[in-house]
Amino acid sequence: MRYVSIIAAAVCALACSSFNIREREHLSMADRAFRTAEKQMGGQVEALGSHTEFPHSLRNGTLYCTQMTDWTEGFFPGCLWYLYEHTGRTVWKNTAAEWTGNLEPLKKFTGDHDIGFLTMSSFGNAYRLTHDRKYAEVLVEAANSLSGRYDGTVGCIKSWNYKKSWNGDEWFFPVVISNMANLELLYRASELTGDAGYAAIADRHALKTMECHIREDGSCYEVVDFDKTTGEALSKGSCQGFSDNSAWARGQAWAIYGFTMAYRESGKKEFLETAEKAASFWLGHPDLPKDGIPYWDFNAGRRGYVPDWQYDSLKYSTVPRDASAAAIAASAFMELSEYSSDPDRYFKAGEHILETLSSGEYLAGAGTNGGFLLKHSVGSMPEGEDVDVPLVYADYYYLEALTRYEKLK
Ligand code: GLY
């Protein structure tokens, strides 16, 4: 009898494990990632409870959260909306709605351009998936807050109020490349209200960015400072990159992402051409590693991009990869494949990044990585902040990219 039980248990264990193997084999890349996401983010929801501490990164091995003081708080609710979209489970819809609702005071935020990130990832996805007008109202109010930062002479939204750059230069009207992604809030407001004024601001901002931020080779400056009285560019450089003339990887990803989105919303051919030019710089770069995940700056560690005396003091001897830049680019490549005359080029580039990010090198095992999905991102290298750690926005754009990938397949 004892032997029968042992054999029965062994058969059961074997059946279960071969079922798990079979099940795993049949799961798509996106299904596997979303299963991990359910476990990871479910753990974060449980650990946090209160909905007022928003996961940001892992610092000293501990979950680091912010409370509506950063540009990133919308991304955690945004991940929860993608979980709802992929699984169709009501529990994720309710959880996402709770976390989103807590961000409503941000609709009046006028301190910088980040209100686009904050509200589109949370309320934008909420409205896209539920069509509940209460979310639309928040988006329109947020768009009013953002458009208040627009200046007609410059033809741009003022991204930051900082008066000084990191290296001490005086700034008057700084406009950053990630501001491109925030224009989606304005396009959405035009769609929701029928008022074309929001989209007109977005178009003008994108055109000026195309003229002033994008270099001849398709790479971009992170920050351009403008003269408010003439609208002329006063200086061009970087803040989070290796040097003023280098190509900061996440900035490059924002350029591809932002101009692809601006083309989708405006239909302007020049935005599609700019997105492809920026994408070609990325894909053709000799220092892009074969696995598709860029170093945090395409030129990091290269002499010639900073004066030699500065190069020696930077000591970037270890050049980390940036999974957040890769995830944003993957999502952008997926969308770009829908509009380009060479769809395969971008679909395959995005798929390649997603395959690498979904491997054990980047995708965390359940119960590890502080509940985040992706490892190896870089927040701000020059400040030494969040280097080679998980970041909530890497997870958000990874889930967005996988969602787009599944729809295109
Ligand atoms: N604030 C945008 C970025 O760091 O990419």
Image (spheres, rainbow, N blue to C red):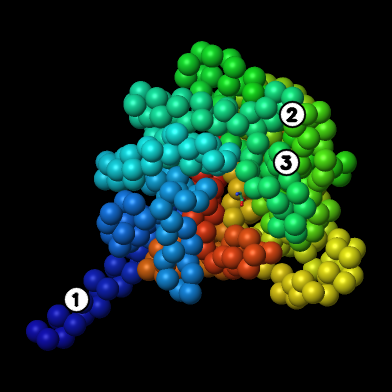
Mark pair 3, 2: CA separation:
11 Å
* Callout 1 amino acid: Ala
Q: Residues within 10 Å of mark 3 (few under 14, many from 20)?
A: some
Secondary structure beneath disc 3? loop
Above or below, 174 relative to 306: above
Q: Residues within 10 Å of mark 1 (few under 14, many from 20)?
A: few
Is any part of residue 339 visible from this angle?
Answer: no
Side of 31 where 196 appears, left or right: right
| Residue placed most toward the observer, 44 or 234 | 234
Residue 246 locus on image (x, y percent): 81, 55
Label 2 vs 1, first from the N-terminus: 1
- Position of the C terminus, as image quadrant, is top right
Secondary structure beneath disc 1? helix
Q: Which residue is mark 1?
A: 8
Q: Residues within 10 Å of mark 2 (few under 14, many from 20)?
A: many
**Residue 92: quadrant of the picture:** top left
For image coordinates 38% across by 42% down, the residue present is: 103
* Callout 3 amino acid: Phe
* Callout 2 amino acid: Val
Q: Which residue is mark 3?
A: 172
Comparing labels 2 and 1, the label whose residue is closer to the camera: 2
Above or below, 100 relative to 144: below
**Residue 106: quadrant of the picture:** top left
Evaluate if marks 3 and 2 touch, with contact meaning CB atoms under 8 Å apart. Answer: no
Q: Which residue is mark 2?
A: 154
| Residue placed most toward the observer, 86 or 220 | 220
